[in-house]
Image (cartoon, helix red, strand yellow):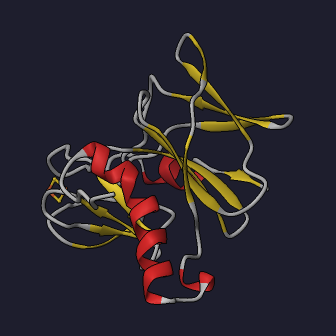
């Protein structure tokens, strides 16, 4: 499978490419701290419901352009769209971070901006827990520069 690193489809293939590359290089599984999977939501109005992740990892809902991340005891729902110029961000499992496909801005697993052209963190959707599901309100987004309190609070503690 070719590792397309420039398109949104390439973003979704990144996890498989990374795993293939790691296997080819004989790298230990611990290098890939958070596996990536593709998921679909149960949609109802402005809400999307996903199974609450039971282990740390990155899940992508390509249709809704939502990234679900479980990391360090919290679950986040973030936009697949880079806040700089709306290119797709992708998960780099070997490096354990997100990176924009256009200008290579870098973000931590929680969406915190670390370097590049972007001027804020990855946008987060409001989230809440409902039993074994995480419910994401996709008709609203928290931008870290305009609403830092909302952005920080947009997480489910697990
Ligand atoms: S579009 Fe992502 S850094 Fe420019």
Depicted 53 relative to depicted 5: above or below: above
Location of residue 102 in the rendering, given as x and y in whole percent from the top left corner: 14, 57
Depicted 106 relative to depicted 27: above or below: above
In this view of the protein, which residue sits in the foreground, 15 or 54?
Answer: 15
Q: Position of 129 compared to 108: left or right? A: right
Location of residue 146 in the rendering, given as x and y in whole percent from the top left corner: 33, 47
Q: Residue at x 54, y 84 (%)?
A: 31
Q: Position of 138 compared to 72: left or right? A: left
In this view of the protein, which residue sits in the foreground, 34 or 24?
Answer: 24
In this view of the protein, which residue sits in the foreground, 35 or 86?
Answer: 35
- Which image quadrant shows ligand 1? bottom left
Q: Residue at x 51, y 89 (%)?
A: 26
Q: Confirm whether residue 122 shows in the render.
A: no
Q: State how many labels appear.
A: 0
Depicted 31 relative to depicted 14: above or below: below
Location of residue 98 in the rendering, given as x and y in whole percent from the top left corner: 38, 64
Q: Residue at x 56, y 37 (%)?
A: 126
Which quadrant of the structure image shows residue 115?
A: bottom left
In this view of the protein, which residue sits in the foreground, 102 or 155?
Answer: 102
Q: Confirm whether residue 26 shows in the render.
A: yes
Q: Quadrant of the N terminus?
A: bottom left
Q: Quadrant of the C terminus?
A: bottom right
Which quadrant of the structure image shows residue 130?
A: top right
Depicted 143 relative to depicted 28: above or below: above
Q: Residue at x 43, y 28 (%)?
A: 64
């Amino acid at each position: 499978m070719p590792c397309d690193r420039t398109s949104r489809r390439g973003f979704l293939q990144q996890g498989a490419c990374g795993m293939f590359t790691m296997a080819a290089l004989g790298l230990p599984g611990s290098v890939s701290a958070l596996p990536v999977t593709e998921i679909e939501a149960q949609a109802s109005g402005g809400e999307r419901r996903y199974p609450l992740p039971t282990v740390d990892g990155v899940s992508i809902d390509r249709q809704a352009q939502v990234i679900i991340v479980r990391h360090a005891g919290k679950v986040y729902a973030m936009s697949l769209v880079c806040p700089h110029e709306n290119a797709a961000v992708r998960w780099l499992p070997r490096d354990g971070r997100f990176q924009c496909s256009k200008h290579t801005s870098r973000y931590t697993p929680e969406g915190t901006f670390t370097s590049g052209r972007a001027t804020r963190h990855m946008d987060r959707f409001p989230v809440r827990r409902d039993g074994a599901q995480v419910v994401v309100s996709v008709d609203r987004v928290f931008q870290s520069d305009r609403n830092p309190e909302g952005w920080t609070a947009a997480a489910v503690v697990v």
